Image: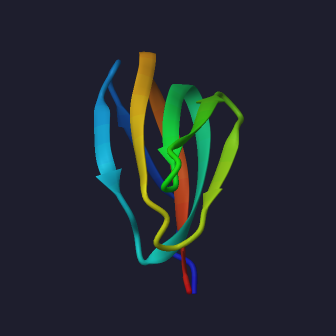
Amino acid sequence: MATPFQRWSNGPRAVYATHEHPYRKILVVESGSITFMVGPDRRTVAMKTGDRLELPASTPHSAVVGPDGVVCTEEHIAV
């Protein structure tokens, strides 16, 4: 079952420490930019307006917001 899309934003250069979720996460950047470091190898995924990222459940990830902040929508899908 999926949750309704949620919208969130953060200011320039905000940092999200490494964490993971028990659900699949689909994220779309509405405006601004954010860079994710994904998985145990910390693969870099730079995202800008219109980009989409799917994170499987239990995938470790961290992120740094770009210089102009970011606005995203995301959906959580139970596994």
At a point 41% along the width and 38% down the height, the residue shown is: 63
The x and y percentages for residue 61 are 44, 51
At a point 33% along the width and 50% down the height, the residue shown is: 18
Say which quarter of the image contains residue 31. top right
Q: Is residue 18 above or below residue 70?
A: below
Say which quarter of the image contains residue 22. bottom left
Q: Quadrant of the C terminus?
A: bottom right
At a point 71% along the width and 34% down the height, the residue shown is: 50
The x and y percentages for residue 16 are 31, 41
Along the line of sight, the residue nearer the viewer: 56 or 48: 56
At a point 51% along the width and 31% down the height, the residue shown is: 35
> Can residue 68 be seen in the rendering of this structure?
no
Colour scheme: rainbow
Q: Is residue 19 above or below residue 52?
A: below
Say which quarter of the image contains residue 19. bottom left
Along the line of sight, the residue nearer the viewer: 73 or 15: 15
Q: Is residue 9 above or below residue 25?
A: above
> Can residue 37 be seen in the rendering of this structure?
yes
The x and y percentages for residue 33 are 54, 25
* Residue at the front extreme, as displayed: 41
Q: Quadrant of the N terminus?
A: bottom right
* Horizontal arrangement in the rendering, residue 42 relative to residue 19 (left or right): right
Numbered disc total: 0
The x and y percentages for residue 78 are 53, 84
